[in-house]
């Protein structure tokens, strides 16, 4: 089992070491999405040997869709990863897989298409391409997650963090502010949506890759951690703080060493009233029913 | 030179027949299993067989969607289903799961396998990968602009299908779970509640900053790409796809007839502005939302979005089909909806 999280600050390596992190994910310019922070190629190149000295793996977030004119850019990013001994590359576009396989780098790839790995057959079929691992969808039940883990090795489960609900290529915030004649706050990272009849605050932001909307609640699988045998565990840092991510890494270790996950879940609810915690779809099957559609 | 394919949606056998009679070269339908629209489908295997028979009599093809993102129990009986589709004479399946692709290639090799837009394919490298997996055609992501479609088409050996008309997902297709979170209905297994088109208040920190007259929405205008058909033909695109399996018979007839006329006139080299305006006028009579050109011209603008009272409204409403007309009484008989 590896414990994995996003890196907020290259200078805070000691925080991650103290929290028991096994792998840090960093974002590079133009190829990453949903990143907590983007770093320059130069700073990452200088940082990797230092991280490796601490026995922590380095992974790159290459989760952006690759448009045709960006192929060279992604190729350069993969070359950078190869030359600088990046351990793993998270990707969601099979074009990135194709490029990496042409460079003999399949074994460093981790497929994270957010919604698409929902059964053991698909998980295994992608693993059979020679990639390192796959990240399971967060919209499946705990029962399905466990069944996939029983049948498939090399799976990663995101056990803590907000769920990425929507990625549009459109600049939806700019468009809205322009339409309404409001001050353009599309660069703000403190914007939230609230459905007109509900009160859940869902983070929304816009960057060069489009618009992203996240769940109002922080998905937390503390109560089931001990059942996720063989899986790598991931904390998604989007719209969270480095402090909370490091604390969570620390607490996940405690749970894996025997502390009660349910009690830890309740403690988080009490200690962090500013966040809404949920167990997402762990015990909730989604319905296939549709009324009025395209 | 092969002429470009006009690919129509159909929600039932009547709409399939209308689509073909009004000029579709191929029709895509969803069966009762493994499809994003399976719960709303009227196509059991017997009806699909009847559809294929009708299509063949009119030199048309039937594609069947097998495009749900399956959960652990959803793939049961897939092999038998694919074998049946092959036996019936279906031309192609449209799918999004690698397991479905591989299964089809193994058990029903005569079926063409088309990669669904649910995979949001945006580049020729991804298409190269899917070709190795045995895929026969790729439906490009609706996020590609015309120049990207052109360069992808030039760089790939696989036939390309693009959407030209109908509703647009605001998200990259296949990657949206708004509906799952907002309604517990799985968007990737046919349950999409279109939560993107709902109205939302907006806050910065704790302060509301939205315009109370026009709440925020992620609702896009529908796509109408009639003016790009000639360019798409020149790009070497194989198939032009219309969205809307849930739309009415009237929609299918109106939209397919308009694009059929346009495509035929383009091949005759005989499209002037007057004719194009006639086509645009005809298309405006179908029950779409207000329309825009999607990503064909690049990043959509503020005017391509729908806010406030326009939210999800279609501009026309289908009220009835005329079944017969009594010459003596001058009265039609009609089937209302």
Image (cartoon, coloured by chain):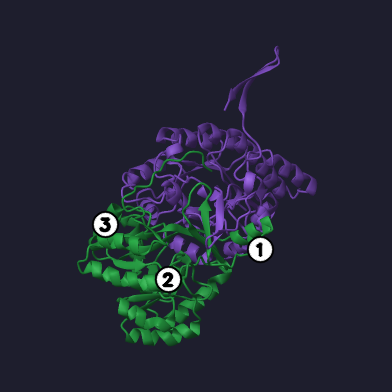
Chain colours: A green, B purple
Instruction: State the residue position of label 3.
Output: A146
Residue at x 64% of width, y 55% of height? B232
Which mark, residue A183?
Answer: 1
The one nearer the camera, A31 or B44, is: A31
- In the rendered view, tell whether residue A120 sits above or below residue B37: below
Task: Name the subunit of mark 3.
Answer: A
Do the residues under discs 2 and 1 have CB atoms within 8 angstroms?
no
Look at the numbered disc 3 and give the secondary structure of its residue: helix
Residue farthest to the top? B328
Q: Residues within 10 Å of mark 1 (few under 14, many from 20)?
A: few
> In 3D space, how far apart are the residues under numbered discs 2 and 1 (Cα atoms)?
27 Å
Look at the numbered disc 1 and give the secondary structure of its residue: loop
Residue at x 33% of width, y 43% of height? B80
Q: Are marks 3 and 1 on the same chain?
A: yes
Instruction: Report x, y in % for residue A55.
Output: 31, 82
Instruction: Report x, y in % for residue B34.
Output: 40, 45
Which mark, residue A267?
Answer: none
Task: State which tag comes first along the sequence, 2 or 1.
Answer: 1
Task: Name the subunit of mark 2.
Answer: A
**Residue A48 in sight from this viewpoint:** yes
Residue at x 31% of width, y 76% of height? A19
Give the foreground label among 3 and 1.
Answer: 1
- In the rendered view, tell whether residue B111 sits above or below residue A170: above
């Amino acid at each position: 089992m590896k414990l994995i999280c996003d890196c907020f600050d290259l200078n805070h390596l000691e925080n991650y070491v103290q929290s028991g992190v096994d792998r840090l994910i960093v974002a590079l310019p133009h190829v990453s999405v949903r990143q907590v922070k983007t770093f320059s190629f130069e700073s990452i190149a200088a940082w990797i040997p230092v991280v490796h000295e601490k026995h922590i793996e380095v992974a790159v977030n290459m989760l952006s869709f690759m448009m045709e004119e960006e192929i060279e850019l992604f190729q350069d990013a993969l070359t950078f990863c190869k030359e600088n001994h990046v351990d793993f590359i998270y990707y969601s576009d099979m074009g990135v897989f194709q490029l990496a396989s042409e460079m003999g780098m399949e074994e460093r790839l981790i497929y994270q298409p957010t919604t698409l790995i929902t059964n053991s057959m698909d998980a295994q079929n992608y693993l059979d391409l020679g990639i390192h691992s796959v990240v399971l969808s967060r919209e499946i039940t705990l029962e399905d997650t466990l069944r996939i883990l029983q049948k498939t090795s090399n799976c990663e489960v995101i056990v803590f963090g907000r769920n990425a609900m929507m990625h549009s290529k459109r600049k939806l915030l700019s468009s809205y502010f322009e339409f309404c004649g409001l001050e353009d706050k599309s660069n703000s990272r403190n914007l939230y949506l609230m459905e007109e009849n509900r009160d859940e605050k869902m983070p929304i932001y816009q960057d060069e890759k489009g618009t992203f909307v996240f769940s109002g609640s922080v998905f937390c699988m503390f109560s089931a951690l001990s059942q996720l045998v063989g899986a790598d565990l991931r904390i998604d840092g989007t719209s969270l703080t480095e402090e909370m991510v490091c604390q969570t890494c620390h607490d996940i270790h405690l749970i894996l060493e025997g502390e009660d996950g349910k009690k830890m879940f309740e403690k988080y609810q009490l200690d962090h009233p500013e966040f809404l915690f949920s167990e997402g779809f762990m015990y909730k099957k989604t319905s296939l029913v549709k009324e009025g559609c395209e | 030179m092969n002429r470009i394919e006009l690919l129509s949606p159909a929600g039932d056998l009547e709409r399939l027949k209308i689509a073909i009679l009004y000029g579709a070269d191929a029709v895509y339908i969803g069966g009762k299993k493994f499809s994003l629209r399976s719960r709303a489908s009227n196509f059991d295997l017997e009806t699909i067989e009847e559809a294929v028979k009708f299509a063949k009599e009119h030199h048309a093809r039937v594609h069947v969607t097998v495009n749900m993102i399956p959960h652990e129990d959803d793939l049961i009986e897939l092999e038998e289903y694919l074998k049946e589709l092959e036996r019936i004479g279906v031309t192609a399946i449209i799918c999004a799961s690698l397991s479905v692709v591989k299964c089809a290639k193994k058990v029903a090799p005569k079926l063409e396998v088309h990669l669904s837009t649910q995979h949001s394919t945006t580049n020729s490298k991804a298409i190269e990968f899917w070709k190795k997996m045995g895929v026969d055609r790729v439906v490009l992501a609706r996020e590609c602009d015309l120049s990207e479609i052109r360069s992808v088409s030039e760089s790939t050996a696989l036939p390309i299908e693009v959407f030209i008309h109908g509703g647009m997902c605001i998200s990259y297709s296949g990657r949206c779970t708004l509906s799952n979170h907002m309604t517990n209905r799985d968007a990737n297994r046919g349950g999409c509640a279109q939560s993107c088109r709902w109205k939302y208040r907006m806050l910065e920190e704790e302060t509301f900053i939205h315009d109370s007259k026009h709440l925020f929405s992620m609702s896009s205008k529908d796509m109408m790409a009639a003016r790009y058909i000639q360019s798409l033909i020149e790009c070497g695109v194989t198939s032009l796809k219309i969205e809307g399996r849930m739309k009415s018979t009237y929609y299918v007839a109106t939209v397919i007839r308009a694009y059929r006329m346009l495509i035929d006139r383009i091949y005759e080299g005989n499209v002037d502005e007057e004719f194009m305006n006639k086509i645009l006028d005809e298309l405006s009579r179908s029950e779409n939302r207000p329309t825009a050109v999607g990503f064909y011209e690049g990043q959509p603008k503020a005017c391509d979005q729908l806010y406030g009272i326009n939210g999800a409204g279609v501009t026309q409403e289908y009220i009835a089909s005329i079944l017969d007309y009594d010459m003596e009484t001058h009265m039609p008989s009609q089937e209302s909806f």
